Image (cartoon, rainbow, N blue to C red):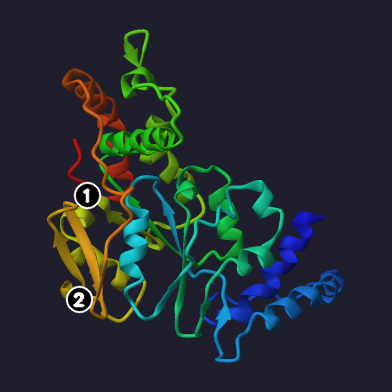
Amino acid sequence: MAALLLGVELLLAQPQLVPSRPAAFGAEPGQQELLRKAGTFLDDVREGTAPNGSAQQLPQTIIIGVRKGGTRALLEMLSLHPDVAAAENEVHFFDWEEHYSHGLSWYLSQMPFSFPHQLTVEKTPAYFTSPKVPERVHSMNPSIRLLLILRDPSERVLSDYTQVFYNHMQKRKPYPSIEEFLVRDGRLNVGYKALNRSLYHVHMQNWLRFFPLRHIHIVDGDRLIRDPFPEIQKVERFLKLSPQINASNFYFNKTKGFYCLRDSGRDRCLHESKGRAHPQVDPKLLHKLHEYFHEPNKKFFELVGRTFDWH
């Protein structure tokens, strides 16, 4: 029954809210009763329209990952554009069963209010590595544009560990060293989840089963850190946005060691939890890590038709 109701929401939510979204399917015999019962959802949508003409819209773009790849930086930079309305929090609609069971009306309620000309963007980094997500996103909108930001897989593993480590430290809970996670019985521990998240070709294959490569723009996370403006220009073009973000919107903060944003005379940097120093790792272990990702990286390069400057 839940799946049936979700199908009805898919039929109704898209044409009502976002004109650029693919047209809804026509009501086939047997669907009329479902459409009649969906009146409550439509009423909720109409109630979501503000007096100034803005409304909550299902996202036309999703930043699908990867975790610790720079998704927050990408969203903040993209939010500099006046035609972008971004959801503040990670919604986890497609990967958390509890949220997905609430249906599209709940998902819609998590979106920011925006005007018809604006692009609504949501980011949940866990989407990229969640097996069920690609099909679910495709069911909502097969023409959606997806953003994927990736970093050197080895560096991403270290960032993944660093985040969890600091989360434990803040709660005054002990946490094992990274070596204890990376090594088991003298060998690289391939069961470590952080390693699996960096096997980009495995997860990308799952997404390409449902979306053509032209619908997925890969942002070079390492370049975004070093020189953000060119990468954001590529994102603007992919999303068919007018070029509104300028080089003057970025400035290098020597104290923090990375780029911050300048918007209408107001400066802002990412949260202090971003850009933390990675733990010191034995060079031999780091070499093992680089060797482990060598072949998977080659497979990913072949899959997407481009290379990245990774170890």
Is residue 231 rendered to the left or right of residue 196?
left
Q: Which mark is residue 246?
A: 2
Whole-number angstrom distance, CA of label 1 to CA of label 2:
20 Å
**Closer to the camera, 295 or 311?**
311
**Closer to the camera, 179 or 116?**
179
Name the kind of residue labelled 1 in the image: Asp
Q: Secondary structure at mark 1?
A: helix
Q: Mark 2 Cα within 10 Å, few/some/many (few <14, many 20+)?
A: some
Q: Measured along the vertical axis of the image, is residue 48 above or below residue 267?
A: below
Q: Residue at x 33, y 35 (%)?
A: 162
Which residue is label 1 attached to? 222
Q: Position of residue 248 (x, y in %)?
A: 16, 74
Q: Residue at x 20, y 76 (%)?
A: 246
Q: Position of residue 239 (x, y in %)?
A: 36, 72
State which tag comes first along the sequence, 1 or 2: 1
Q: Residue at x 63, y 84 (%)?
A: 49
Which image quadrant for residue 240?
Answer: bottom left
Which image quadrant for residue 74?
Answer: bottom left
Q: Residue at x 55, y 91 (%)?
A: 52
Query: Which quadrant of the figure contains the N terminus?
Result: bottom right
